[in-house]
Image: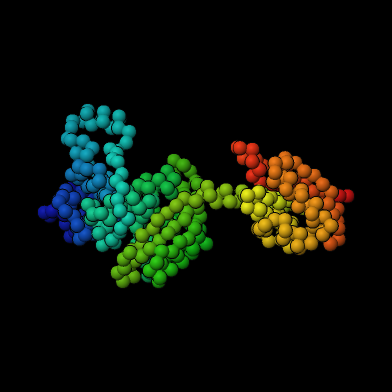
Amino acid sequence: MDDFGSGYSSLNILKDLMVDIIKLDMIFIRGDIGGRGGTILSSIIHMAKWLDTPVIAEGVETIEMADYLKSLGCVYIQGYLYSRPCCEDDFMEYIRNIRHEPANVSVSLVNALDSGRFWNPDSMETLIFSNFAGPAGIFVYDKQDNSIEIMRINKKFIKEIGVGRTEKDIFETSPYDTMDEINRKKFEDTIHRTIESGDEETCETCRKICTRMCGEEKICVESSMRLIGQAGDKCLIFEMVRNITAQKKHISELEENESRFKAAFEQANVYAWEVDVATKEMRPCFRCMRDLNLPPLVKNYPEPAIEAGIFPPDYADMYRELMKKLENGAGTIEAIIPLTVGRVPFHVRYTTEFDENGKPLKLYGSATLVV
């Protein structure tokens, strides 16, 4: 259906004709669209989506308008932005050689958002959403059936969590399609919280993205949501996203390494700690904290350890002198020292880390039971 929205190409015709494609009349994107025009345009695009009918926008002449249309879900666009009318041979040559769409430098703007002006392509809010807000999207949440429909996304959103998907792929699916029951509930609970509080609410969800290009890939996403509009059971939610997959993987690896490290220490029967020379702050290992009741951070070391009886009184001055030697630049020191009230003999060893100027930076200590 050509020139939809003008003449006889109206909503009434759509209920009687099974059209393959709806082509929007260029009148929709001329002049000042404004809030009402943008809302109508968005509604037409999403209505066509519900009818499973593609939409083409004609008369597009600027990259800003193309980005705006794509952010609403209209992914088929024609106009002078891409090419003027040409013959078939020139067109085929153009198709063979084109690599990407025209690009434009992003504009940095002030951080101010107004939900009522999101539908205006020339508004400050749209420019901020597209260029400054970070990876972001807007979706409608229906409280009746707990469904989600994506209304707008920016390019950063696609780059952050697209995983090989295009705007078309994202608009044709629901975020729920990528989540299992546990993660879907976490996502829904966050939506409910932001609706009830009116404040920003955050959650982390694991998602499984499937594409023909990349296959199956699992990602972790941090979502920060805020309610920006409501009409009856329909809630308009603004969502900022962050791909935290690498961060989660790193934390998981650290936890796994720490578990192995603890197991190794248990087998080796070794106590370990580090001391910051400048601040005299000591950080003990988990065995020191467990067996010697030391806190995670000991200030003014070694005095608190001496006062706690870890070093017997007759060895206190010897240990203080050992620490002074290390602070003055000794690289390695070893000694047999009885520790705790039971005067259990331990082999205590220190190594020093120096800065680029040769000044002592950190002391690494260990104590091994003398058998």
Q: Is residue 48 above or below residue 88?
A: below
Task: Please name the colour scheme applied to the rendered image.
Answer: rainbow
Q: Could you tell me which residue is drawn at 49 percent across and 63 percent down?
A: 186
Q: Could you tell me which residue is drawn at 73 percent across and 63 percent down?
A: 293
Where's residue 7, x and y in %? 11, 54
Where's residue 323, x and y in %? 73, 49
- In the rendered structure, the answer to whether residue 224 lies left or right of residue 334 reads left
Residue that sits furthest to the right in the current view: 371
Name the foreground residue: 83 vs 343.
Answer: 343
Q: Which of the 4 image quarters holds residue 296?
A: bottom right
Name the foreground residue: 263 vs 7.
Answer: 263
- In the rendered structure, the answer to whether residue 346 lies left or right of residue 91 reads right
Where's residue 202, x and y in %? 45, 61
Where's residue 287, x and y in %? 74, 56
Residue 42, visible in the rendered structure: no
Name the foreground residue: 63 vs 285.
Answer: 285
Residue 214, visible in the rendered structure: yes
- In the rendered structure, the answer to whether residue 139 lies left or right of residue 47 reads right
Tag count in the figure? 0
Residue that sits furthest to the left in the current view: 7
Q: Could you tell me which residue is drawn at 18 percent across and 55 percent down?
A: 33
Q: Is residue 79 above or below residue 43?
A: above
Q: Is residue 224 above or below residue 68?
A: below
Q: Could you tell me which residue is drawn at 31 percent across and 66 percent down?
A: 229
